[in-house]
Amino acid sequence: MSLVHGSGHNAAVWTEVASRLVDHCRLVAVREVTLRAFLRRADGLWERRPAIEEIATVSAPAPDAVIHPSVDVYARIRCPVTFVLPDRGFYAERLGCSRFPGRPEEVLNEELVARLMAGFGMRFVCLTRRTGIPAFIAGMATSCSPEEGRRDRVVGLDDPQRVGKFNADWYELSTEYGLFSADRRFLVSLTPAIDPAFNSAREEADDWEDPAWWEHSWGLVELSDEWDLAGAGAASGVLGSEYGHPGFAMSAIDGSVLIAGTVWQDSIGSAVLPKPYRSPTLRELARRNVGFRTPSENEDLITFLNRNE
């Protein structure tokens, strides 16, 4: 023990030895997990074959479980972790997270989104597509008329308390019209443009007019106990352009209500639109866009137009 706690050359040597042992143990652990989780096929490729016990565990977690598979577990990891990404099969599209050329539809940086949202009081859960709610249309709720059900709350741009008042108004509207689920979850419209690397790639792309470069996605989020949309949220670039200048679109998970935050000429405000699928303005916009968006957006447009509640 005197060598480990000593100083000078001996301490340095044992520190190096300890570091190498940790790295070796980590490699051994990764190798054992890989061999256990993958089967080598006759063609030389490796195939993931989860055990029945694994499928049962992640398919039906106990309601009172400390960690829920595929979501909460990632927020609790406090050590180096290795992910093996497939190049074919159901989850092959996740390779797009590396932002390969020609795959603009996969470039939204989820890690960046989660980090930014944590700074203003939202917990990013996951991206979700084919919700039946066109994300790009949600931002047009401010174009609907009061006759279509739209209701507004505004605060003057020159009001020194505008951030706090906007936040309070947004929460009151969200609560009154049912934006939140029982666990305070809802959808936020997201664009990959919050990532500077994406903006650079889009500007340099020959096919920058491709709808995939401009697609908005829904992020499932959970509101924390302490949050700040118009202040920190707007300043982050996720919910606006700068502090006190909000700009966002949100939806209830079932699409029953939309809420948009925006900046007017002399004020900022929230606009809520219940039952948006009944809005003539949004339905006309949806009809005009069918066939001109990405495949997943076109599916949402058709589902939106077919909703008759």
Image (tube, grey):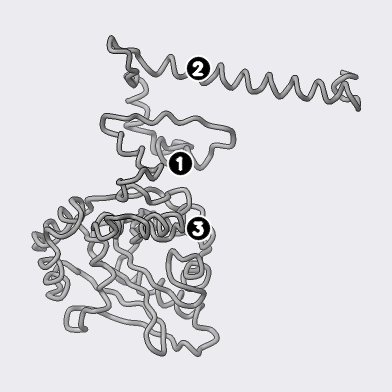
Q: Is label 1 in a helix, a strand or a loop?
A: helix
Label 3 CA crowd tier, 10 Å (few <14, some 14–19, many 20+):
many
Quadrant housing residue 251: bottom left
Specify whether 116 is left or right of 18: left
The residue where tag 2 is placed is: 31
Callout 1 amino acid: Asp
> What residue is at 39 percent from the left and 60 percent from the top?
193
Occupied quadrant, residue 57:
top left
Q: In this rendered view, identify the residue nearer to me: 225 or 247.
A: 247
Q: Earlier in the sequence, mark 1 or mark 3?
A: 1
Q: Secondary structure at mark 2?
A: helix
Q: CA distance from mark 2 to mark 3?
A: 34 Å
- Distance from disc 1 to disc 3, alpha carbons, whole Å, reads 18 Å
Within-10-Å neighbours for mark 2: few <14, some 14–19, many 20+: few
Among the two numbered marks 2 and 1 on one chain, the one whose residue lies closer to the N terminus:
2
Residue picked out by circle 3: 116
Residue 222 shown left or right of residue 129 in the figure: right
Quick one: 21 or 276, which is closer to the camera?
21
Looking at the rendered structure, which numbered label has been put on residue 72? 1
Q: Is residue 115 left or right of residue 283?
A: right
Q: Position of residue 120 (x, y in %)?
A: 51, 63
Q: Residue at x 45, y 77 (%)?
A: 245
Establish if 64 lies above or below 280. above
As shown in the figure, which amino acid type bears the numbered disc 2? Answer: Arg
Task: Work out whether 280 lies above or below 52.
Answer: below
Cα separation between marks 2 and 1: 25 Å
Q: Amino acid at mark 3?
A: Leu
Which x, y percent locates residue 175? 36, 69
